[in-house]
Image (cartoon, helix red, strand yellow):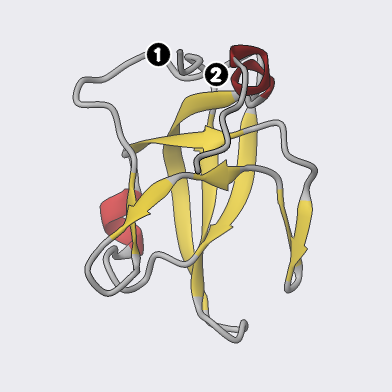
Amino acid sequence: MKKYIGFEDFQKIDIRVGTIIKAEENNNLKKPSIILNIDFGKDIGIKKSSAQLKMNYKSTELINKQVAAVINFEPKQIGNLISEVLVLGFPDEAKEPILISPDFRVSNGGKLY
């Protein structure tokens, strides 16, 4: 049986859109990742995230891509980096992430509803 949550619970998760302005490979972890600098607009600013995206993305392809991310999780230490936001995606056939992006360009910092 599915366990349902109330709409109030959903509203606690702050999912915003941002534009990747910098992406660089981090091969110093057990599972190599890409360090992302994401611009969430003037009210939220630029946040960092470490994401295991190397199977489906090249760092250079990610620049200027808009992505969805949870911005109100507690920052997490990942290797030598503090990851400030959690970028969101769905698994492909190999269980590797495919990023969630809007179909059209939207303002950075826009909240998912």
Q: 10 Å neighbourhood of mark 2: few (<14), some, or many (≥20)?
A: some
Question: Mark 2 belongs to which amino acid?
Answer: Gly
The image quarter in which residue 80 lies: bottom right
Q: Is residue 46 left or right of residue 2?
A: right
Residue type of the residue flagged with mark 1: Ser
Q: Quadrant of the C terminus?
A: top left
* Residue, far front: 1
> What separation in Å lies between label 1 and label 2 (alpha carbons)?
8 Å
Eyeballing the image, is 40 above or below 95? above
Res 107 label? 1
The residue that label 2 is drawn on is 41
The percent position of residue 46, horizontal first and vertical second, equals: 61, 33
54 to the left or right of 42: left
Q: Nearer the viewer, residue 25 or 50?
A: 50
Badge 1 vs badge 2, beta-carbon distance below 8 Å: yes
Determine the residue positioned at 28% across, 27% down. Answer: 102
Dot 1, crowdedness within 10 Å: few (<14), some or many (≥20)? few
Q: Position of residue 95 (x, y in %)?
A: 34, 69
Q: Nearer the viewer, residue 5 or 81?
A: 5
- Above or below, 104 against 56 in this view is above
Residue at screen point 25% across, 63% down: 92
Label 1's element?
A: loop
